[in-house]
Image (tube, helix red, strand yellow):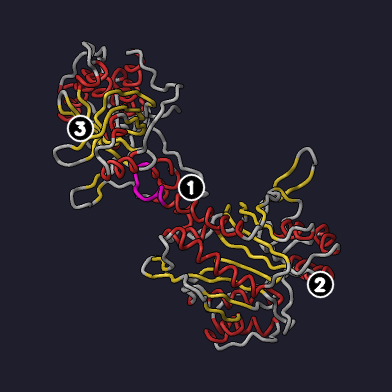
Amino acid sequence: MSEHLSEQELQRRESLKALRDLGIDPYPAAEFETTHHAAPLLEAFADDEANQEFKAVSLAGRIMTKRIMGKASFADLMDSTGRIQLYLNRDEICPGDDKALYNDVFKKHLDIGDFIGVKGFIFRTRMGEITLQVQELTVLSKSLKPLPVVKKDEEGNVYDAFTDPEQRYRMRYVDLVVNEGVRETFAKRTRILNAMREFFNQYGYLEVETPILQPIPGGAAARPFITHHNALNMPLYLRIANELYLKRLIVGGYEGVYEFSKDFRNEGMDRTHNPEFTVMEIYVAYKDYFWMMDFTEKMLVHVVKAVNNGATKVPFGDKEIDFGQPFKRISMRDAILEHTGFDIDAKSEAELKAACQELGIETDDTMGKGKLIDEIFGEKCEPNYVQPTFITDYPVEMSPLCKRHRENPDYTERFELMINGKELANAYSELNDPIDQRARFEEQLKLSEKGDDEAMFIDQDFLRALEYGMPPTSGMGIGIDRLAMLLTNNASIQEVLFFPQMRPEKKPQLPSKADFEKQGVPANWSEHVLAAYGTVEEFKKQKATQVHQKMNGYRKKNKLDLPALQLEEVQTWNSENN
């Protein structure tokens, strides 16, 4: 079934045709050269109004408001930096006898959301508003769908806001246009990445790229997405982590490498998880996890200051996160002991399961010691760590890629950075003993055989690389999406992803002419009533007098080759409401 067009959409298509009839290309190919952007232009003019550069200004953007006042009009133009008021005088933009550019193009055929280019000069109105007086106007792109009109009164109250989350995420292109602050969220996300790169590059570390399609999904315990390579006739996996490839590069002789990677995990979706997400991982030779803790602190302080005007305190909801050094440090054993009274040290799988039952934590038969301890910490400890806290020294069962602790081989030299009750970063003194690594992989294989579909695969090529020798190394991964959430004060990961994964859009059942004919509308009027009302439900709300008035107005406006409707005729339509 073809798409149903609203009355506004039909009107915009009529305007599109009218522009073409006037000889105006509504989608020109030629460059429109601009000299300024709105926000910096307003700031610069306020500082130096006498500057001659403001006598010849060229801007481009969307029309966001129109206020027609006869021979003169005002409009708001929005570009990538902000808005500026336009003043259009008919005789200024149409100095000759032909006034069509103002009377027809601007007044009748340009709508809110259309792109235009304007040239003119800057002045202040009597009300003191900095304004561009338009001397030339060029149509750059005609929009065929109306934007949601978000209104704001003099007190700053917002009405008719485009706030439905599903609509905002599904139509991010509209969200970016009409909702203030959304574009700044994504600009800040980019500044976070730039600040992080700047920090790493100061140390001389190399940014690299590693495969997204992998024959073995290694480097993390997660369920992968599976695809098939036709030419090679083999299964491939979207990467769940880039860790093993980056460590191969350390084997190859690089001292420090890092990558901003898109990772994919075929798992649940919620306010803090998306199946496609961004992670930064860095590996540095001849370092350990103590060095990496200090390095992570310094890096985060650098990033936070770079995007927070030099401050280290960041608002998040009703809390304030303080990134000032030093961060708190506590071992996982001590954290669990503090919040549950249970000591995980040297406990068997059966003892851990019993503890979970006493603590009210659900378990199943696929869970080994590592997952049981992870459940205890996640349920009972994690939410308590609001301020930046390093949780250190994880049990060996939880960390198959991590070096055993130098003082207690039951634990590993690993830390996770917790902020606002969530993991933000994860780091190790990397395991570089190939024999120990093979044994850890084989333990993961046993978990897989028990039914754990998140257990790690054995990567034989990575083991071979380790056998060539990897120097002592520390590695760290940090969730970019969660960091962006923290630094932009957003509680949902969908707010910091341009296009988060969504369920398939449910297409509404579109009405047809036949639906209206069932209501008694004659065939020669049914398509026009459909265009005017959109749905039978909306049509049925109307009294016969309202339909009579609206459809005769529609007939006149659209120059329909139909006789004028009589009220008696309309009263036979939709008779139950008459």
What residue range appears in magenta?
Answer: 177-184
Mark 1 vs mark 3, CA separation in Å = 33 Å
Q: How many numbered discs sit on the rendered protein?
A: 3
Q: Where is residue 549, by image quadrant?
A: top left
In the picture, the disc for residue 480 is none
From the top left corner, tell me how far across and down residue 387 is, in percent. Answer: 47, 74
Find numbered disc 1 in the image and state the secondary structure of the residue it sits on.
loop
Q: In which quadrant will I find the C terminus? A: top left
In the picture, the disc for residue 67 is 3
From the top left corner, tell me how far across and down residue 540 is, in percent. Answer: 25, 35
Mark 3 vs mark 2, CA separation in Å = 74 Å
Q: Is residue 73 left or right of residue 468?
A: left
The numbered mark, 1 or 3, whose residue comes first in the sequence reads: 3
Mark 2 vs mark 1, CA separation in Å = 42 Å
Q: In which quadrant will I find the N terminus? A: top left
Q: Give the answer, above or below, for where 91 lies relative to 372.
A: above
Residue at figure coordinates x 75%, y 68% from the top left: 444
Q: Is residue 503 left or right of residue 392?
A: left
The answer to whether any part of residue 250 appears in the image is: yes
For disc 2, the marked residue is 436
The answer to whether any part of residue 571 appears in the image is: no
> Toward the viewer: 361 or 231?
231
**Residue type, mark 2 in image:** Asp
**Residue type, mark 1 in image:** Phe
For disc 1, the marked residue is 498
> Toward the viewer: 113 or 9?
113
Q: Is residue 182 magenta?
A: yes
Find numbered disc 2 in the image and state the secondary structure of the residue it sits on.
helix
Mark 3 neighbour class, 10 Å CA radius: few under 14, some 14 to 19, many 20 or more: few
Q: Where is residue 242, by image quadrant?
A: bottom right
**Residue type, mark 3 in image:** Arg
Q: Are marks 2 and 1 in contact (CB under 8 Å)?
A: no
